[in-house]
Amino acid sequence: MSRARQPPLVTGISPKEGAAWTKVTIRGENLGTGPADLIGLSICGHNCLLTAEWMSASKIVCRVGPAKDDKGEINVTTKSGGLGTSTVSFKLIRPERIGILDQSAVWVDEMNYYDLRTDRNKGISPLSLRPANPLGIDVDKGKIPPKDMELTFPGMSGDFTSENFSATLYLIDNHAGSSFEQLKVAAVNLKKHSTKKNEGSLSSVKGGLSTFFEAQDALSAIHQRLESDGTEKVEGSMTQRLENILNRASDTADTLFQEVLGRKDKADSTRNALNVLQRFKFLFNLPLNIERNIQKGDYDVVINDYEKAKSLFGNTEVAVFKKVYEEVETRIGALRSLLLEKLLQTPSTLHDQKRYIRYLSDLHAAGDPAWLCIYAQHKWILQLMQSCRDEFISGQRVGVGALDLEGDTRPSALARLGHTASLKRGGSLRTPRPSTWRFETPQQVQFVEKLSDVVIGQLPNFWKLWISYVNGSLFSETGEKSGQVEKSKKNARQRQNDFKKMIEELTNRLVKLIRGALLPTTLPQGELSLYAGWEGKTELTGAWLTQIIHTVRGCHDALSALEIPNDMLQVIQDLLLDLRVHCLMVTLHHTAEDVKRLAEKEDWVVDNEGITSLPSQFEQRLVQMLQSLKEPLEIKSGEINVLQLDQVQDQATELSVGIMKVFITCLEQLSTKSDGDKETSHNISVDLSSPDHFTGVQDGFSPTSEQRLLIILSNCQYLERHTFLNLADHLEKHSFTGTEKITRVSVDAIRELDRKLFEAYIERRADPIAGSLEPGIYAGYFDWRDCQTPSGVRNYLKEALVNIITVHAEVFTVSKDLVPRVLSKIVESVADEMCRLMQCVSSFSKNGALQARLELCALRDAISTYLNSDSNASFKLAVDALPQLHSGADKKLLEELLNKFKSSMQLQLACFQPSSYQPVKR
């Protein structure tokens, strides 16, 4: 195979010289692999390919044509090796010709030459033997248009053999640029030529003088014989009789040989016709061969045969050849129509389009086939895009999509074009989907995916076809056909603006179709009927919008990879910006709806930190939201940060604040939610009689309204101290703007809710305890002015302490951290009530004062852990309102009674001791 690719080398030719049409044998190396591989053969500059007969890779037989050069090289050209070289040469011997104006002593037969270049039986006219330059000076053709010459010299000719010869017209045609001195030289040459011709005639007569004398003697003898013959008057002259004899002989001969000669003439005619058919079988078989090759699809063979026939018979004057050539032109015209139909047929591959364009160019088709193909592809892509939208709108796409998924396992155009880029990113352009994807995916998402496949499947070939049209590679990869290449480049330069409009129309149509499906409000009112109509379809969530953004970005990246100018793709960037903003807003709205439904998922199960799963679920929802927004908010090449837009930033901040407020509202609603199965209020003493109620919150537990308040209060504290701070970190991590405002408003709102819930709980628990003090003090018509010696702390105070213990147990069960806060407030309420009651007593007896001091000191010492400045002040005011103890016996009795009380209530009061409470570290 390496030898077949070497250029041909001619090493010998036999014979080495000869006249035109001499048969020669060429020998050498690498002279082709077969007759079809031989595409060029010239000897002395004359093309001898038509008469060449390939014998082997080292031998070719042909005939030498009437070349211009007397001596030259033998050049062989093959498809496999290209143009070859030669180490030998051939010498062409030219025969001398005698013109009609030349003197000759012998008869010159008429010579017929067969012109193999034009395949015409053309007799050389004697006028062709005239002198080429009678003036003997250089010919200098003029540049005067022929039309002007015809107007100036009507009916005249510059041919000196014509009857209407004009010397002036001849000089203008052939010597318009010659100087006067050159014309003077031409006149001298013309005189010399005339003198030489006269001298030649005289010398010819002198040379044949004896011939003239012999002719004269013969004529004289014939004349004398005729005069001496006396039969002229009787039988006519001798010549008359001779003529009669010859006529009779001719008639007899015609009678005898007319049939034979007729058959001979017919046979000669048939033989000549067969010779012509055999010699020109290429032309006569060409119409049938063209038809067969068209049916087989061998268009290259048809074009090569047509080019050969056109070069050989395009200008023929032979009627038969003209008729056959017209039939060839008819078949070629039908082939042009067929190729143009195939070129404009859709769909078709880029390879086929280039092939048909080259064929039509080689066949010299009218118009610009390449531009017609580009225009047809443009219209077809637009039709595909609109049909895709119409199918989804009419609802036909559901079943078709399922069939496509099962029947066609090939990857989509988007996946194919984005494969390289996806590998660089470490993943595929599309994530794997289950088999039921088409049935679960919203119609808008399927539509955008399908539309992207249509655009990316067709637009790259459309763009590459234009690039080939611009650089001329449609006609030749190497630029061999420079004329066609330059013509293509010129046409492309003239149609650059038209093609730019085509690309812009395609991208605008893509954007408008997607906007109609997802963002109909961004379209003008007049275009809604063409691109909208998706009102009845499913509303998309942020996740599906993210998938669409991913698809549109892949489409943009694929088109950018084709090196399409960015200004033509700017509308896709604008669409991406609007989609990202829309996705952000939709995600925030849907997150607010999800957070609103979190109240339904509250199970009231608290952990060891006193909180339920609700804060964790809320934080998880927002983190998931931020993660889902990661891709839409990501800034790709050529994109801008949507959060830097003032309007978008303000809306996103307000929606984020709204999400926080929605959750806080949910907490408030949960705190006030009533339980229809149980009473919302409970008697504290009854609660105390069921100690198992506070052993822990189990599954299926339905809390009381007071316990709801405590659980929500615990959640509020956790939100303020942990959840909101964590969310602020997540917002900052995802470059979310307005984090400070979101956190500030959220903390203020949760603090306000905490305050309201705390006040509501204290009101429910402190008021009953404080309200039971006064009836308990004066039970049994007790009078401070008339009472017995104190024997211990009365029951009302013990009952009040038990109720405080009950509240402690209730709070401790939910959250240990709330115990000091709640009990301090209840103790403050009880201390304030005791102070009020003591100050309202007008006078105390000795025993009354001792009883009051005993009870105040017992209460203060029992709840000393939860005393604050206000409760301390209240106890001090209450004690100050009592008479002072002066006797040591009273003081001793007071001390004994206090010790007795503490000893008897030691177990109950143990919960108030600081050692019994160890806050849980968070």
Image (spheres, grey):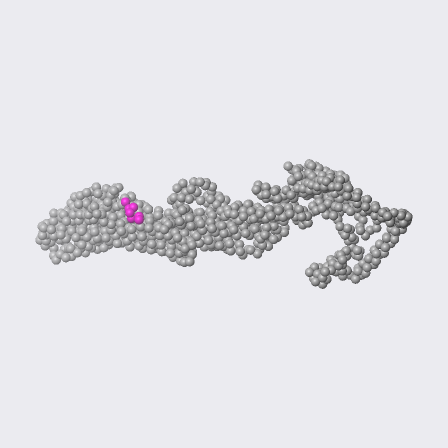
Locate residue 619 relative to residue 314 in the image: left or right.
left
Locate residue 727 relative to residue 420 in the image: left or right.
left
The front one of 839 and 178 is: 178
The front one of 540 and 914 is: 540
Q: Which residues are magenta?
A: 597-603
Quadrant in which residue 179 is drawn = bottom right
- Where's residue 565, x and y in %? 52, 53
Q: Is residue 540 in view? A: yes
Locate residue 283 relative to residue 503 in the image: left or right.
right
The front one of 674 and 193 is: 193
Quadrant in which residue 698 is drawn = top left
Q: Is residue 90 in view? A: no
Residue in the picture at 55% in, 45% down: 351
The front one of 764 and 403 is: 403
- Where's residue 667, x and y in %? 28, 50
Residue in the picture at 47% in, 48% down: 454
Which quarter of the rendering shows the N terminus? Answer: top right
Locate residue 785 relative to residue 581 in the image: left or right.
left
Which secondary structure class fits the magenta region best?
helix
Count of all numbered marks drawn on residues in the image: 0
Q: Is residue 20 above or below residue 647?
A: above
Residue in the picture at 38% in, 44% down: 440
- Where's residue 131, x and y in %? 79, 53
- Where's residue 264, x and y in %? 72, 40
Magenta region includes residue 585: no
Residue in the picture at 85% in, 47% down: 235
Magenta region includes residue 599: yes
As drawn, the residue found furthest toward the front would be 234
Q: Is residue 67 above or below residue 157?
A: above
